[in-house]
Image (cartoon, rainbow, N blue to C red):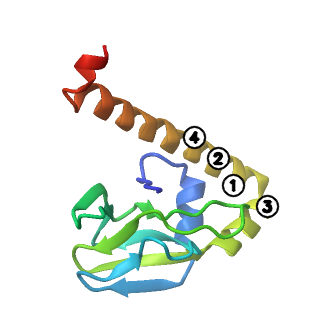
Amino acid sequence: MMNITTDSFSNELQQFFMSFDHKISFKKGDFLFQEGSTSTHLFFITSGAVQVGKVTPEGRELTLQLASSGDLVGEVMLFCGSTPHMLQAKAIEPCTAISIQKRVLENELAQYPALSMEYMKWMGLQIKRMQTKFRDLILNGKKVLSILL
C-alpha cells in the first residue's frame, strides 16, 4: 500500500505524477481496486477522499489509510511481474485520480535514473513510516503485550 503526501516527496516526483493525463472520476462507493484483483495501476488522488483497507472474513471493514488530494494509492510492486492486491481502495466521497500504469511507471523510472532515485527515497520513507505505525500499534495498542514483556 502506498500513500504519498505532497510534503513527503520532491518537486520533481510530484511534477512527474501530475504529468500523466489519464484522469478517472469515481463516485462515492466506487472501488479504485479490490482485494485479489491484479495490481496494474497507481492512483494519484487529485480531489476527494479514498479509504484503503481490508474486509475480514467476518465481514468487518478495517481502515488502514484515508487518502486525499496529493496522495498516491496503490499496491504496485515495480519490476516484479504481476501481483494481486492485498487491500481494497474505495471512494468515500466523489473523487478524481490520475491513473498511472505500472509498465509506464517502470519504463519512465528505468529511463530517468534521477527520477528513479527520488522514487526510491520516497519508498524508503514510506516503509519507515509504515514500520513506525506497526511498532506503535503493537507496543501501545494492545494490552496482551504486557503479558509478553
Position of residue 113 in the picture relative to residue 88 (left or right): right
Position of residue 99 in the picture relative to residue 51 (left or right): right
Q: CA distance from mark 2 to mark 4?
A: 6 Å
Question: Residue at 48% of width from left, 72% of height from top?
Answer: 36
Q: Earlier in the sequence, mark 2 or mark 1?
A: 1
Q: Nearer the viewer, mark 2 or mark 1?
A: 2
Q: Earlier in the sequence, mark 3 or mark 1?
A: 3
State yes or no: discs 3 and 1 in contact (Cβ < 8 Å).
no
State yes or no: discs 2 and 1 in contact (Cβ < 8 Å).
no
Residue 92: quadrant of the picture: bottom left
Residue type beneath disc 3? Ala
Q: CA distance from mark 4 to mark 1?
A: 14 Å
Q: Earlier in the sequence, mark 3 or mark 2?
A: 3
Secondary structure at badge 4 equals: helix
Residue that carries the numbered disc 1 in the rendered image? 115
Residue type beneath disc 2? Met
Position of residue 62 in the picture relative to residue 75 (left or right): left
Q: CA distance from mark 2 to mark 1?
A: 9 Å
- Tell me the quadrant of the picture where the C terminus can be found: top left
- Outermost residue on the right side: it is 111
In this rendering, the answer to whether 142 lies above or below 91 is above
Q: Nearer the viewer, residue 128 or 121?
A: 128
Q: Nearer the viewer, residue 88 or 121?
A: 88
Residue that carries the numbered disc 2 in the rendered image? 120
Task: Residue 111: give x, y in percent of width and height.
Answer: 80, 63
Residue that carries the numbered disc 4 in the rendered image? 124
State yes or no: discs 2 and 4 in contact (Cβ < 8 Å).
yes
